[in-house]
Amino acid sequence: MKKKLGELLIEAGVLTDAGLASALAEQKRWGGTLGKMLVEMRLVGEAQLVNVLARQLSMIAVDLDVIEIDTAVLELVPGELALSYGLVPFARPPGCLDIAMSDPTNLGVLDELRIRSQLEVRPFLAGPKMIERAIAKYYGRRSQMRLSQRLSPIVGEIESRPTRDAEIDALQTRLSELESSVARDEEVLRKLLALLVEKGVATRDEILDRIK
């Protein structure tokens, strides 16, 4: 049986048993991937995480920040799944689908992707923050395009009224601004909440009680 992410990091000497237990508890409470939680809690550095896994699993790391991913490749993996498991499809060689992920020990999601895509899935390594940026960049853009497509028939009908042209133009501009800021606002809020907890201003449970 292959070892899990936490076990590999402990074996490499970059994570303690106590640190892993703490990260697993936070992951259970807040969701997300273990790799991302370890980096956010500063228990393991992102570069350190990638280097250890690349060495121990003999895998290749990819830099998503310098890759331009084709829309046809992104469509092979739903955005919800990409976000839940912390992964991004970035290439489709003949008969294959190349996936960047921060936890390649998650064999279950690899099997799921094989079934979905009917392709041989090849895992590559990338840091959790890098993957988060790629998801926001590519899947956020696609969500905005889908919304624009749904609104276009309505907007087209209204635009036939000449006296409303200026108002419609302003509305479209504002809509684009709001859509492009959604991912950024969510990230800022998440970091703010994490800072409040870190500084002892409030516990995570207290914050959750307030926003219910």
Image (cartoon, rainbow, N blue to C red):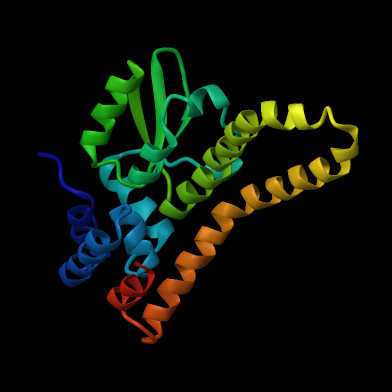
From the viewer's perspective, is residue 150 above or below residue 209?
above
Q: Residue at x 52, y 44 (%)?
A: 134
Along the line of sight, which residue is nearer the eye, 6 or 10? 6
Residue 102 position within the rendered picture, expressed as x and y whole percent measured from the top left: 36, 47
Residue at image x 48%, y 26%?
75
Report whether residue 40 is seen.
Answer: yes
Q: Nearer the viewer, residue 14 or 208?
A: 208
Quadrant housing residue 104: top left
Residue placed most toward the observer, 208 or 199: 208
Give how far across and how far down residue 210 sits, in percent: 36, 74
Above or below for 210 versus 64: below
Is residue 19 toward the left or the right of residue 113 in the image? left
Q: How many marks?
A: 0
* Left or right: where 165 falls relative to 48: right
**Residue pushed farthest right?**
163
Residue 45: x percent and y percent?
39, 63
> Can you say which quadrant of the picture contains the N terminus?
top left
Residue 60 visible, this angle: no
